[in-house]
Amino acid sequence: MSSAIAISRSPLLQGTAGLLPSSKSISNRVLILDALSGNQSVVSNLSSARDTQLMQSLINSRDEIINVMDAGTTMRFLTAYFALTGKKKILTGTERMKQRPIALLVNSLRELGATLEYLGTQGFPPIRTTGFLEQKTAAVSIPGNVSSQYISALMMVAPLLPNGLAISLHGKIGSLPYLKMTAALMKEFGIAPEFSDQAIQMPHAAYRPTTLTVEADWSAASYWFAFTALAETSEIKLPNVAKPSLQGDQVIVEVMEKLGVKAAFHEKAVSLTKQASAHHLEWDFTQCPDLAQTILPVCAAKGITGAFMGLESLRIKETDRIAALQTELAKIGATLTEEGIGRWKLEPGTLGSSIVVKTYHDHRMAMGMAPLATLIDLKIEEPEVVNKSYPGFWEDMRSVGFKITKF
C-alpha cells in the first residue's frame, strides 16, 4: 500500500526552517574531488541528503556492483570516476535510472581511452567499466545543452589524464552555473580550469587536499520562498544561507522578488516576508532548471501568467518533469502548453478546496507542490521521496505552522 500524508491548510506561517540541508550539488562534487586528492581533506557540513550519503558510501566501495538507486548525479560522476581510475565496476540503479540516457558521457570516456560496455539497452545503464590503459585524445566535444552533470563529471576527472583535456561545448550552453561551481571547487583542490568561449581546458595536475565547509542548499531554500509567496502572512528564517554563493539557484531571490517575496540577508541567514507581486512572469530556466517545479506552481496558484524557456532538460530527470507538472497543475485548473519549440505558456486556473498530489518518485514534485498547502488542503503520495535531497522537509513545515498527518 502506498504511503501518504495529509497537510491541513495553513495561511499564516512563522518560524525557522532549522533542518534546511547543505548543498547536495556541492557535497557530491566535493566527495569526488576529495577521493581524487587521496581522501585527506577536512570537509564540514556535508549534505544529509540521501544522494550524498549514497555517494559517500559508494565512491570507495570495494563491491563490484554499484547501485546508485535513482541518483543521477551519482551515476554520472561515478561512471567517469571509475572509468578513468581503471576500476572494474558495474553501475546500475532503479528502473527509471535505466531509462535515463548516458551515451554522451560514455562516448566521451571511450574517446579518451576508457573501456565501458552496456549491459542492457545501448545508451543507458547498467554499464560496466573495465579499465583505462592510455589516453587516446586530449580533446572531446559535447553538446552544451545536455545535462551539465556529464560535463562536470569529465571536468573533475580530466586532471588525471597525462595530456589534460579540452572540452569543446557546441550549441547553447545550459546550466552554466553548475559548470562554474565545479570549476570553483576544483580550484579549492588546487586545479583551476580555464573557460574560453565554448571551451573548458583542464591541465594534467595533481589535486591537493583542502579544508572546506559546504554552504546551505539554495535549491532546498527555494521552497520557502514559494511558501512565503503563497501565504497570507509569512515570516520565515532560513539559517546558513549565503549570498554570494557558488550555487546558481540563488537566482530564486530575483525571481521571487517578482512573485511577492522580500529577502533580507543577515549574517549567515536570510529572512523572508511578503510584498506586492507581478501579474506576469517571463523566465528562461536554461541556467536553473531545478527551480521550475518551485516557480510554476506559485504562478499557477497566484493567478500569474507565465512565458517560459529552458525547460528541455526536465524531460530526462527523475521523471518527465514537464509531463508531471502538466498533470499536477491541471488539478488546480492551470495549463502548461508548448507554444513553439522550447517556448512554454502557463495559464492559471481556479483553486478548489483540496487535491491529491502524485510525486512520481521525484523529490522536487513533492516539495514544489507542498506550498499549495497555504491555500488548500493537500494529500501528498509517497512523501518519503524528499529524503533524496531534504530529509527534514516535513518537519520544517511543521515548525512554521503546518499540521501534517500520516496515513
Image (cartoon, rainbow, N blue to C red):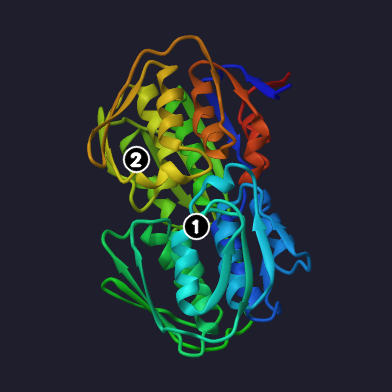
125 is higher (above) or lower (below) than 342: below
Residue at the spot x=46%, y=51% of the render?
265
**Residue 141 found in image quarter:** bottom left
The amino acid type found where label 1 is placed reads: Ile
In the rendered image of this protein, does residue 145 appear above or below residue 259? Answer: below
Q: x%, y% of residue 259?
A: 34, 34
Nearer-the-camera pick, 384 or 120: 120
Q: Which residue is nearer to you in this view: 118 or 271?
A: 118
Mark 2: few/some/many CA within 10 Å (<14, 14-19, 20+)? some
Camera-near label (2 vs 1) is 1
Query: Which residue is at 62% across, 57% downward?
Result: 119
- Quarter-wise, where is residue 350 in the image? top left
Q: Amino acid at mark 2?
A: Glu
Q: CA distance from mark 2 to mark 1?
A: 37 Å
Looking at this view, name the residue that lies furthest to the left.
Answer: 340
Considering the numbered disc 1 on the image, is that residue within a helix, a strand or a loop?
A: loop
Who comes first in sequence, dot 2 or dot 1? Answer: 1
On the rendered image, what quadrant is the N terminus found in? top right
User: Residue 112, percent across and down?
Assistant: 47, 78
Q: Which image quadrant: the C terminus?
A: top right
Mark 2 secondary-structure assignment = helix
Q: Position of residue 159 (x, y in %)?
A: 51, 83
Instruction: State if disc 1 and disc 2 touch (CB < 8 Å).
Output: no
Task: State the residue position of label 1.
Answer: 102
Residue 257's tag is 2
In the image, farthest residue toward the top: 353
Residue at x-position 63% and y-position 39% = 386
Q: Note whether residue 184 is visible.
A: no
Front one among 164 and 42: 164
On screen, 389 above or below 372?
below
- Indicate the position of residue 274 as horizontal and vertical percent values: 41, 32
Q: Is residue 151 visible?
A: yes
